[in-house]
Image (cartoon, rainbow, N blue to C red):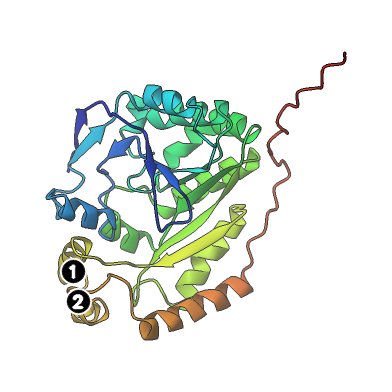
Amino acid sequence: MRAVYREEPCRSALNRVTGMGFRWSLNPYMGCAHRCAFCYVRGFERRADRPSDDRYGTSVRVKVNVVEVLRSELHRRSWRRETVAIGAATDPYQPAEGRYRLTRGCITALGGARTPLTLITRGPLVVRDVDVLSEASRRVAVTVSVSIATMDEALAARLEPGVAPPRQRLRAIRFLTDAGIAAGLALAPVLPGLTDVPRDLAAVLAAAREAGAVHAWSNVLNLRAGTREHFLSVLEREWPAEADRYRRLYPAGGSGYLRRADADPIERRLAAVRRGIPITDRRRIVLSPEPDPEQLPLAI
């Protein structure tokens, strides 16, 4: 299913965030052609009265002026150079980026303004920007997380219909870390009953370590309203035996998070697997920021 791209300017580039591990986010696009069945953004789309079902991702807003607006915001006297997360709501390396190069421009702007950045993507196109990521890494802290939920390519194809296969994403991690960039794994989301078996978790972590990942983090599936309905429809079609169990695990009207009694066993399995397959920084080249220039006192 091909996406329609709408070129629409934005008024602001940086978004203030609460309740997350970062205070600022940046999304050069709204809507995502990857159309992942579990995407939590479907919930936000539903609350905004926009399609969260199979139509999600068929219309993508392209913020054609986002780089210029970002540069202006970064030059405000009030800007404190806090970390900016790119891709928190929509993938910055979905296919449109190949044409518009907005993510690339934003990385250049952030690095030039000495603003740390963290980036999450499922798109191997990130390797195209190794040059600007390397340049930014010499000025500020830069981390890249490549998201992989499973090494099972058949399973991934049904869950992430618009995304490149897992092995291709692993090659992106290798390419970036070989260049000295701090790239790692986002094992996300972990899907109860589908990807939370220890051997499956271990397969992803082991493949990421082999690819040179310098960090790894994970989260368990969240199914808030909007995402829940679509994901259940995918289960009914692809794994009908799982649908009733997911209705019990994620009841309608709930928070979208697993109850502690259901989440704790998964977290324990994750912790055990991570202890057995530790991810450490083994880069031969490590790009790190140079210290800020100091103004010497004027001798009188």
Looking at the image, which residue sits at the far bottom? 261
Q: Name the element at disc 1.
A: helix
**Residue at 18% from the left image edge and 73% from the top image edge:** 253
Say which amino acid is labelled 1: Leu
Quarter holding the C terminus is: top right
Q: Position of residue 61 (x, y in %)?
A: 23, 34
How dense is the environment of label 1, judged by Cα within 10 Å: few (below 14), some, or many (20 and up)? many
Mark identifier at residue 232: 1
Location of residue 206 with respect to 211 vertically, above or below = below
**Residue at 60% from the left image edge and 33% from the top image edge:** 134
Asked if the residues shown at circle 2 and circle 1 are in contact, with their CB atoms under 8 angstroms apart, the answer is yes
Query: Which of the 4 quarters of the picture holds residue 195?
Result: bottom left
Location of residue 176 with respect to 68 vertically, above or below = below
231 and 52: which one is in front?
A: 52
Quarter holding the N terminus is: top left
**Residue at 19% from the left image edge and 51% from the top image edge:** 45
Distance in Å between CA atoms under marks 2 and 1: 6 Å
Q: In the shown orientation, is residue 74 left or right of residue 63?
A: right
Report the residue marked by disc 2.
Answer: 243
Query: Which of the 4 quarters of the picture holds residue 57?
Result: top left
How dense is the environment of label 2, judged by Cα within 10 Å: few (below 14), some, or many (20 and up)? some
Q: Name the element at disc 2.
A: helix
Q: Position of residue 51 (x, y in %)?
A: 13, 50
Location of residue 52 with respect to 264 vertically, above or below = above
Q: Position of residue 276 (x, y in %)?
A: 62, 74
254 and 138: which one is in front?
A: 254
Q: Position of residue 12 (x, y in %)?
A: 33, 32
Instruction: State whether residue 101 appears in this view.
Output: no
